[in-house]
Amino acid sequence: LQKKSREESSGEGSGVEILANRPYSDGPGGSGQYTHKIYHVGSHIPSWFRALLPKAALQVEEESWNAYPYTRTRYTCPFVEKFSIEIETYYRPDAGQQTNVFNLSAAEKRQRILDTIDIVRDPISPGEYKPEEDPKLYHSAKTGRGPLGDDWLEVAAGGPLMCAYKLCKVEFRYWGMQSKIEQFIHDVG
């Protein structure tokens, strides 16, 4: 993944700038590692559109608090000041049975959409499919695990499992577009 990330973020108008990478002791999740990065995303935008945008529109800022088993990551764009995406994650040694790992209020629970991701059975668009990343085909020589069948979750229930619970919050506070843009980001994100 690191090699793939480097290949996708090379060239002019791309890459990652690390502004901070330091431990913290009294923050989200307790003690952990704080990072602040700027992603330069210009190379991922068509050149004709990039020419119309100011430099600030071609940057995404990421602040992350990593205190395993809890992480919180916030994405913003300096050009769009009323926009943010915040992702909270809890890693738990289970198969996804916890119903309120984030201790949401009744009102928040009514607003949420639960989306269980099945790494084997969920469809992948043909343009994104890569056989070397298909868990139905991959076998680890090191661990002897894989490939996974459609019943992988039931088969693995007796062994070590980990679920990453994600709470994604999108905020786009621009009158007339807020709900439509927020829903679009949730749908495609």
Image: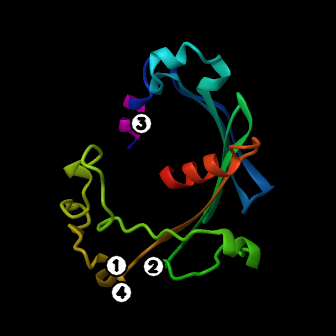
Earlier in the chain: of badge 2 and badge 3, it is 3
Q: How far apart are marks 1 and 3 (CA)?
A: 29 Å
Label 2 is placed on what type of residue?
Answer: Ala
Q: Mark 1 points at which residue?
A: 153
Mark 3 residue type: Ser
- Give the extent of the magenta segment: 2-7
The secondary structure type at the circle numbered 2 is loop
Q: Mark 4 points at which residue?
A: 158
Is residue 170 visible in the rendered structure shown here? yes
Q: Is residue 97 magenta?
A: no
Question: Spatial distance from mark 3 to mark 4, Cα to Cα?
Answer: 34 Å
Give me the C-alpha separation between circle 4 and circle 2: 10 Å
Q: Is residue 12 left or right of residue 53?
A: left
Q: Residue at x 46, y 72 (%)?
A: 162
* Mark 2 burial class by Cα count in 10 Å: few <14, some 14-19, many 20+: some
Q: Mark 2 points at which residue?
A: 95
Residue 101, image x, y percentages: 64, 76
Task: Find out whether the residues at labels 1 and 3 contact each other: C-beta distance under 8 Å.
Answer: no
Q: What element carries label 1?
A: helix
- What is the CA distance from the residue labelled 2 to the residue labelled 1? 8 Å
Question: Tag 4: residue type?
Answer: Gly
Q: In which quarter of the image is the N terminus?
A: top left
Residue 7, quarter of the rendered image: top left
Q: Badge 1, how many Cα within 10 Å: few under 14, some, many 20+?
A: some
Q: Reading the chain from its start, which is encountered first: label 1 or label 3?
A: 3
Q: Which of 63 and 167 is in front in this view?
A: 167
Do the residues bearing badges 2 and 1 touch, measured as CB atoms within 8 Å? yes
Assign a secondary structure to mark 4: loop
- Give the dominant element type of the magenta stretch: helix, strand or loop: helix
Tell me what residue is drawn at x 42 percent, y 36 percent.
5
